[in-house]
């Protein structure tokens, strides 16, 4: 018997709301729908573990003429490994932690707020939702309107920071055409790896949805802006491959760092092409 003091029952919402078809099963999919989010979660988790280890290591990130993309640009005085290399030393000697922590916040913020990566880790780690036509287990859904997910709106600003970072990595790639004595005319296996990496980095950065909006998102008449229209069309074609470029660039930047780590640790010498 109701006493009049009982709290009102919360009405079902989401897939269990009154406006949705009553269905006891969570979903009707019979394929292995869980493979995609599980594989995504495993891939992202592996990169997070590897990049965290390398970022806090503070060692084996420079083997002339190669500098790990995790540590470039090197902004602290404690970049002792890079004496004679591209060390900018803007923060002086007060920074005692790994120099990678000064720069990784920008590419990390860019990728963490990326539209594709949001979908990837929302599905892979939070099951929100785990897959198409599969209901998520959460009782409430607030989207990206509350902290901390409201910070995802900063993606466009991280894009502005990612462009100069890509420019610095381009400079580092040019420097790989020197030998260990900093003489030009060298090309090693690492040079090829860095060329592939910077190509993928630029392709991923320019295929960003924010870049597409910058190029032509506010234009009312494309015919009055033929140059921006061409750029918008080119970026739009890249944008169609944004997911593939996100994974390819993630793998390539880790591969370049690992290659430098092996060279700096003396595992082998860089095979010279010419």
Image (cartoon, helix red, strand yellow):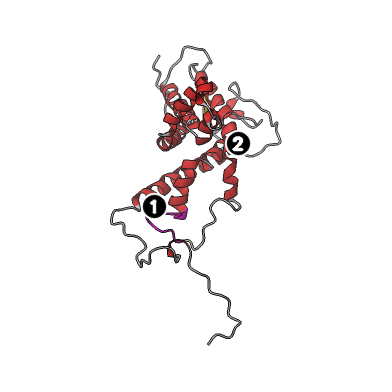
Residue sitting at the far left: 30
- Which label number is shown at residue 157? 2
- Which label number is shown at residue 49? none
Q: Residue 32's spot in the image, x, y percent?
A: 30, 53
Q: Residue at the spot x=43%, y=65% of the render?
A: 16
Q: Residue at the spot x=57%, y=45% of the render?
A: 152
Q: Is residue 239 visible?
A: yes
2 or 1: tag closer to the N-terminus: 1
Tell me the magenta residue range: 126-137
Secondary structure of residue under mark 2: helix
Q: Residue at the spot x=50%, y=69% of the render?
A: 11
**Which residue is at the front of the view, 154 or 81?**
154
Secondary structure of residue under mark 1: loop
Q: Tell me if residue 109 is in the magenta stretch.
A: no
Label 2, residues with CA under 10 Å away: few <14, some 14-19, many ≥20: few
> What predominant SS class does the magenta segment belong to?
loop
**Which residue is at the front of the view, 173 or 264?**
173
Q: Residue 56's spot in the image, x, y percent?
A: 56, 41
Q: Residue at the spot x=36%, y=48% of the render?
A: 36
Q: Quadrant of residue 94?
A: top right
Q: Residue 13's spot in the image, x, y percent?
A: 48, 64
Mark 2 to mark 1 CA distance (whole Å): 29 Å
Q: How many marks?
A: 2
Q: Quadrant of residue 158?
A: top right
Q: Quadrant of the C terminus?
A: top left
- Which label number is shown at residue 131? 1
**Left or right of 270, for residue 68:** right
């Amino acid at each position: 018997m109701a006493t009049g003091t009982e709290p009102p029952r919360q009405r079902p919402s989401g897939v269990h709301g009154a406006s949705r078809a009553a269905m006891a099963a969570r979903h009707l999919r019979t394929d292995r729908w869980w493979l995609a989010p599980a594989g995504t979660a495993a891939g992202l988790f592996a990169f997070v573990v590897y990049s965290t280890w390398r970022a806090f290591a503070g060692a084996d990130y420079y083997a002339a003429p190669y500098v790990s993309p995790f540590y470039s640009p090197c902004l602290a005085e404690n970049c002792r490994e890079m004496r004679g290399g591209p060390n900018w030393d803007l923060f002086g000697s007060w920074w005692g932690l790994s120099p990678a922590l000064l720069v990784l916040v920008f590419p990390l913020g860019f990728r963490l707020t990326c539209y594709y990566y949001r979908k990837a880790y929302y599905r892979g780690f939070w099951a929100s939702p785990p897959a198409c036509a599969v209901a998520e287990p959460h009782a409430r859904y607030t989207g990206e309107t509350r902290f901390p997910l409201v910070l995802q709106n900063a993606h466009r600003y991280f894009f502005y920071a990612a462009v100069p970072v890509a420019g610095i990595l381009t400079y580092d790639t040019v420097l790989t055409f020197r030998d260990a004595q900093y003489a030009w005319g060298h090309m090693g296996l690492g040079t090829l790896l860095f060329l592939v990496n910077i190509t993928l980095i630029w392709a991923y950065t320019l295929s960003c949805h924010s870049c597409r909006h910058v190029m032509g998102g506010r234009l009312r008449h494309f015919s009055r802006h033929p140059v921006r229209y061409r750029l918008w069309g080119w970026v739009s074609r890249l944008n169609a491959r944004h997911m593939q470029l996100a994974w390819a660039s993630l793998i390539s930047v880790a591969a370049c760092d690992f290659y430098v780590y092996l060279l700096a640790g003396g595992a082998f010498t860089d095979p010279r092409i010419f």
